[in-house]
């Protein structure tokens, strides 16, 4: 192979092959946005580029310029062997030269710097520009947390920090004077975790809320913010509706928890000192027992640790035993009693207490009597007493009479 490189014919052949490959490459890789028009019978070619950037030549430390388009359309014409490499490499400049111009409005020509073998046509050819003195000012940055209504229930934005909290804006004095607010937007939708040094772009607006085209320094700030889920422990109420069936009354009602931890935004929690369960319909209760009910929470409030509450209802039942005989205790041997009031020697007894205990009682479990110990012959008025089996000690018993009148013989 070393002998090949020493051969002049091999070198010439390699050079020719390289030239052919380069020509094909230039033909096939010219920017697709360009257009070509070969003029028959001439050795020139035209290519048009639509996105050529425009350079502004001015003292940028002292002045700012408006009105110069960011891009222009440039058509280049000339011999292909000059044109195509320049188009491929973008080896030319397009600019406006504002050096030496005073502040104010000017109509200037867009100029170019390209090989003298080519002709250039620029659209637009001239532009109206406005030159202003450059000004700089420091502004505080505010933050707007957006989509707070889309935070999970009970969550809210807490304390936050911006780094940095101020930025410097350099622009024309007229733009600086129009700046009304400098702010960043932070989207908090669906967040449950705090934000740590999230970078966000800075936005600049005038007093009417119109966005201004400026370049703050820095262009982005870091935002850190707490996403809180405030809670509060409050007492629990158990409301009821309706009335117990006839003959029943409510002795007690109690839940298996007295307090519940609730979660909500701070402004909601501030006005809540207690919460309630769902209402219990007493018209459907006929016996002592436990019912399971959910919580009735205000809007925006959650109690994730308590889905349902067990409520114990102790029901009191009233039952009447009719015509219970009145017994007489303590008579001496040979004494005899005649009832004057009531004359039938009987009375009704009303039992009140736990419905299970009351329901199990019969006349055999209850005794109505008067104590006649030491009573001599004659007419007497004595208090009436009622005795219930000891197993039903929480049951109260009463009669329609407080006393009876008897005659002892």
Image (spheres, helix red, strand yellow):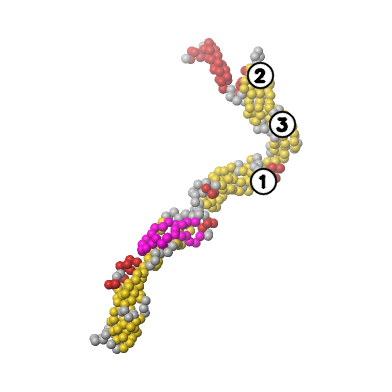
Q: Is residue 134 left or right of residue 239?
A: right
Q: Is residue 256 visible from the viewing direction of this image?
A: no
Chain-order first, disc 2 or disc 1: 2
Q: Is residue 199 left or right of residue 314?
A: right
Please name which of the two marks, 1 or 3, marks the residue nearer to the observer. 1
From the viewer's perspective, is residue 72 above or below residue 220?
above
The CA distance from mark 1 to mark 3 is: 29 Å
From the viewer's perspective, is residue 250 above or below residue 306?
below
| Location of residue 255 by image quarter | bottom left
- Image point (69%, 24%), residue name: 121
Q: Residue furthest front?
A: 343
Please provide the residue range marked out in magenta: 272-298
How many C-alpha atoms fall within 10 Å of the one at disc 3: few (<14), some, or many (≥20)?
some
Give the residue at mark 2: 78
Secondary structure of the residue carrying tag 3 is strand
Q: Is residue 373 left or right of residue 83?
A: left
Mark 3–mark 2 contact, CB under 8 Å? no
Q: Residue furthest bottom?
A: 377
Front-lying residue, 95 or 3: 95
Give the residue at mark 3: 127
Numbered circle sitting on residue 208: 1
Magenta run includes residue 127: no
From the viewer's perspective, is residue 218 above or below residue 69?
below
From the viewer's perspective, is residue 252 above or below residue 28?
below
């Amino acid at each position: 192979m070393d002998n090949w490189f020493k051969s002049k014919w091999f070198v010439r052949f390699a050079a020719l092959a390289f030239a052919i490959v380069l020509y094909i490459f230039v033909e096939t890789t010219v920017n697709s946005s360009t257009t070509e028009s070969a003029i028959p019978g001439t050795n020139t070619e035209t290519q048009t580029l639509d996105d050529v950037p425009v350079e502004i030549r001015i003292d940028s430390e002292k002045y700012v310029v408006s009105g110069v388009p960011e891009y222009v359309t440039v058509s280049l014409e000339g011999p292909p062997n000059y044109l195509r490499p320049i188009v491929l490499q973008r080896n030319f400049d397009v600019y406006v030269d504002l050096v030496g111009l005073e502040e104010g409005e000017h109509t200037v020509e867009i100029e170019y710097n390209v090989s003298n073998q080519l002709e250039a046509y620029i659209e637009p050819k001239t532009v109206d520009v406005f030159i202003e003195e450059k000004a700089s000012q420091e502004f505080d940055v505010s933050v707007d947390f957006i989509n707070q209504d889309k935070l999970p229930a009970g969550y809210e934005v807490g304390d936050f920090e911006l780094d940095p909290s101020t930025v410097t804006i350099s622009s024309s004095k007229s733009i600086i004077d129009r700046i009304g607010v400098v702010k960043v937007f932070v989207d908090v939708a669906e967040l449950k975790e705090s934000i740590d040094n999230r970078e966000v772009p800075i936005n600049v607006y005038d007093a009417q809320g119109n966005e201004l085209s400026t370049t703050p320094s820095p262009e982005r700030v870091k935002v850190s913010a707490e996403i809180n889920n405030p809670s509060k422990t409050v007492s629990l109420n158990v409301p009821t509706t309706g009335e117990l069936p006839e003959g029943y009354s409510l002795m007690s009602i109690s839940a298996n928890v007295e307090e519940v931890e609730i979660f909500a935004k701070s402004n909601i929690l501030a006005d809540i000192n207690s919460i309630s369960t769902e209402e219990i319909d007493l018209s459907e209760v006929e016996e002592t027992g436990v019912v399971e009910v959910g919580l009735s929470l205000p809007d925006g409030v959650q109690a994730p640790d308590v889905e349902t509450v067990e409520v114990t209802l102790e029901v009191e039942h009233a039952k009447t035993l009719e015509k219970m005989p009145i017994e007489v205790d303590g008579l001496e041997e040979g004494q005899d009693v005649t009832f004057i009031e009531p004359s039938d020697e009987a009375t009704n007894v009303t039992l009140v207490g736990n419905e299970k205990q009351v329901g199990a009682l019969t006349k055999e479990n209850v005794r109505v009597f008067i104590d006649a110990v030491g009573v001599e012959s004659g007419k007497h008025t004595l208090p009436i007493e009622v005795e219930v089996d000891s197993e039903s000690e929480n049951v109260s018993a009463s009669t329609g009479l407080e006393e009876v009148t008897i005659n002892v013989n």
